[in-house]
Amino acid sequence: MEYLALLLLNTFLHDKIYSDKKTKNMKKILILSFAAITFFSCKKSSNSNPNPPGGGNTVDTIGTVYAAGYRYDEKKKKTIATYWRGADAVSLTDGTKDAYATGITMVGNDVYVAGYESTGTNTAIAKYWKNGISTNLTDGTKAAEASGIAVVGTDVYVAGYEFNTNGNPVAKYWKNGVAVNLTDGTRYASAKAITIAGADVYVAGYEYVESGASIAKYWKNGTAINLSDETAIHYANAISVSGSDVYVAGLVFELITAKQAYWKNGVLTNLPAVLNAETNSVAVNQG
């Protein structure tokens, strides 16, 4: 298989989390819409079943589009984690509990999808699926979510967060199921995207501060690099690395308006103004 491009498109999955200081109740707002889209170039194979049921590994023609997200089952009244292979929907969950797919990538003919599934008891399990077979990253005792995925060789990296015993979400990533915390759990934080460049692990996300602002940031091998200060609300949603250059896409809140933006090596560029918009993907054309 020859890799063409990987895009995260229109993933409006913001875990805008805040605390009511008077009641001490933790509240979480999830705004969800479409998905992650991936374009791949695949060589033809002698596989007699090019679209195996149950989300097994797959063989495609050049330009097949993969998209991860969810669909709503009207009968069960539940969301089903789903990816689309061209026009064909592949269910990752059975609809007994709400579930969402948030990121997708491929290695060879193997399809990897990140996401999360409700436990039915006010928590959710962060997980990923390989060819439709799920691997839990958390045990469901605390709310957790997986937002991005990257695969290098046999190593699977997943970005997300998990709430701690103090009620704060901890930004983290998992490598082959082993968690690496990126924040100390004293503030609300989330990891949204992950990429690997050589031996370095890059993760994009954000962390709230006491004033109510959020700091857009990325982590390189666990070391945080702040992209904004504590005076406004900024989110980092996606990350790409080209040579020594690090690109992060996200949004900036100005008053009550959300504006799309990206950072290159920490320098902010606001994209042409559109009211209430954001960027959720970044890619670099390397010729």
Image: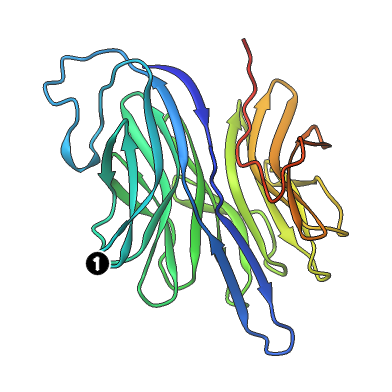
Kindly state the secondary structure of the residue where label 1 is placed. loop
Extreme-front residue of the structure: 275
Q: Residue at x 35, y 74 (%)?
A: 120
**Quadrant occupied by the C terminus:** top right
Q: Position of residue 87 (x, y in %)?
A: 29, 33
Q: Quadrant of residue 43?
A: top left
How many numbered circles does the render carry? 1
Q: Residue at x 40, y 42 (%)?
A: 68
- Give the answer, above or below, for where 210 lies relative to 189: below
Q: Nearer the viewer, residue 161 or 82?
A: 82
Residue 107 seen anywhere in this rendered image of the structure: yes
Q: Nearer the viewer, residue 79 or 5?
A: 79
Q: Nearer the viewer, residue 217 or 157?
A: 217
Q: Residue at x 70, y 54 (%)?
A: 206
- Give the answer, above or below, for where 248 lies relative to 207: above
Residue 203 seen anywhere in this rendered image of the structure: no
Extreme-bottom residue of the structure: 23
Q: Residue at x 25, y 13 (%)?
A: 44
Q: Nearer the viewer, residue 186 or 255?
A: 255
Q: Position of residue 29 (x, y in %)?
A: 58, 68
Extreme-top residue of the structure: 287
- Give the answer, above or below, for where 236 lies relative to 19: above
Q: Position of residue 277 (x, y in %)?
A: 67, 47
What amino acid is found at the position of numbered circle 1 in the picture?
Answer: Lys
Q: How many residues crowd around disc 1 within 10 Å: few (fewer than 14), some, or many (20 or more)? A: few
User: Which residue in the protein does label 1 denote?
Assistant: 76
Q: Position of residue 47 (x, y in %)?
A: 15, 20
Extreme-left residue of the structure: 48
Using residue 48 as the reference point, say whether residue 282 is left or right of it.
right
Using residue 79 as the reference point, say whether residue 47 is left or right of it.
left
